[in-house]
Image (tube, rainbow, N blue to C red):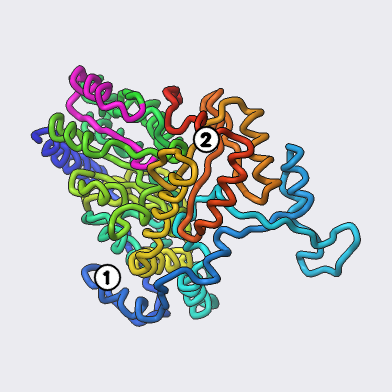
Amino acid sequence: MEVLNSWDQWVEESLSKLEALQLLRSLRPIYLRNEPQNPIGDEYQKASKPIEDDFEVFDKMQPFDRSSVEVEISEPTFLKWVHEVTSSGDEAVCRDDLGDHKSESCPRRFKKLLLFSGNDYLGLSSHPTIGKAAAKFQNQAAQEHGMGPRGSALICGYTNYHGMLESCLADLKKKEDCLLCPTGFAANMATMVTLGNVSSLLASGRKPLQHERVAIFSDALNHASIIDGIRLAERQGSVEVFIYRHCNMTHLNALLSSCTMRKKVVVTDSLFSMDGDFAPMIELVKLRKKYGFLLVIDDAHGTFVCGKSGGGVAEEFNCEKDVDICIGTLSKAAGCHGGFIACSKKWKQLIQSRGRSFIFSTASPVPIASAAHAAAVIVARKETWRRREIWDRVRDFRALTGIPISSPIISLIIGSEDKALEASRHLLRSGFHVTAIRPPTVPPNSCRLRVTLCATHTRDDLKRLTAALSRCINFQDISINGSNVYARM
């Protein structure tokens, strides 16, 4: 664990260099006085209590929950999709829909579809508590504050609402602190670039020598935001990149053992968005103890879905203390918008001072932060039935199809682009919104249907979906999580 202790030292040295250069940046929250005044800091839990008492939670699915999976598309959009005609989306808006009188050229005709391609895993996007949290701020403060952000977080866009959300997310992830970012993409970009900045800062103004750079070991199927962040750090000459075969710990061990660089980082998705499989967390923890690398996970698809309290994949595998930096999003299971980085206070200070995608982005609108706080603090924690339901649906799909899925993300690899598109159109005609995933999102000849399950789907929904699927694919022949190909950096 000597190298892990060295990481603490390297971060402290980096912060000292920034302080000497007067480049250390601070967050100074603007207080919006439309809620009972509560101090920033250790009083976050007290601050959230009055908010918590205001909102209602439910112990089972309610009628409003179905709107998270029941959607409509216009007849022209439906026809273009069925015939695979390119669309710019302008057929989605009729003058009639904007309040003008009806015209024969723009009648109200819509197709109802059951959504099986979103990331709203808990169905929280339609929850009235979350909507009420956003509306409460809007109603009380719209005239004085509007949507809230006056600029980037480091200038004047950071408020007590953002602070409360950061605090509850840090608690959720069992970390010292948390940094909000405008998106999950920005959070990954900021983290990867900051990792590279450690070697640049310690090189004191010169280009780091090869042995001084940060060695980043990245899973071959990591999300594009991780890849792009690493590319940027690599272009700046501050990192060396090693790609290990997807979830292959033998390959990762070989790369780690042959690497003589001291500053090692392993970064991986926790639950992979296109294949639906989990990172081998237990094996990663063993390797971390052996080599002392910094472990960074992107828990975008696991946060609120996995673990007893919704803490994510690390909680599910009981290894939260072994994850050094946990990146997440509020745009999936939280049903809101934004990204975050849960980490130590020192890492937060370093990232907010060097993570360009954070520094130069406008802060999240305050109603969004307020809604996410309601989702993260109240609903996702208290409505535990939602996690039970989504995992019940995973078991239902396994029983109905015989396909050994392990998560709510089901990657049905079909092969050719034409076959995947035809399968998607068949499901569309059957009343299901399931898109075909094609290059460049996935490699050639691994085109697929990406089906996602939600807590607000029912077993009957799955019976109908699997019946429709069985008419266009053979469950016994389908490939799932079986692709050995991987994207190149």
> Residue 94 falls in which quadrant of the image?
bottom right
Q: Amino acid at mark 2?
A: Phe
Q: Residues within 10 Å of mark 1 (few under 14, many from 20)?
A: some
Is 228 in the magenta? no
Nearest to the observer: residue 113 or residue 139:
113
Q: Secondary structure at mark 2?
A: loop
Tell me the tag on residue 44: 1
Query: Which residues are drawn in magenta?
Result: 246-271
The residue drawn where x is 31% and y is 39% is: 194
Q: Is residue 139 above or below residue 184?
A: below
Q: Residues within 10 Å of mark 2 (few under 14, many from 20)?
A: some
On the rendered image, what quadrant is the N terminus found in? Answer: top left
Specify whether 184 is left or right of 84: left
Q: Amino acid at mark 1?
A: Tyr
> Residue 287 falls in which quadrant of the image?
top left
The residue drawn where x is 30% and y is 23% is: 240
Kindly indicate whether the residue at mark 1 contacts the one at mark 2 (C-beta within 8 angstroms): no
The residue drawn where x is 46% and y is 66% is: 366
Q: CA distance from mark 2 to mark 1?
A: 50 Å
Residue 435 position within the rendered picture, expressed as x and y whole percent measured from the top left: 60, 42
Specify whether 192 is left or right of 97: left
Q: Which residue is mark 2?
A: 475
On the rendered image, what quadrant is the C terminus found in? Answer: top left
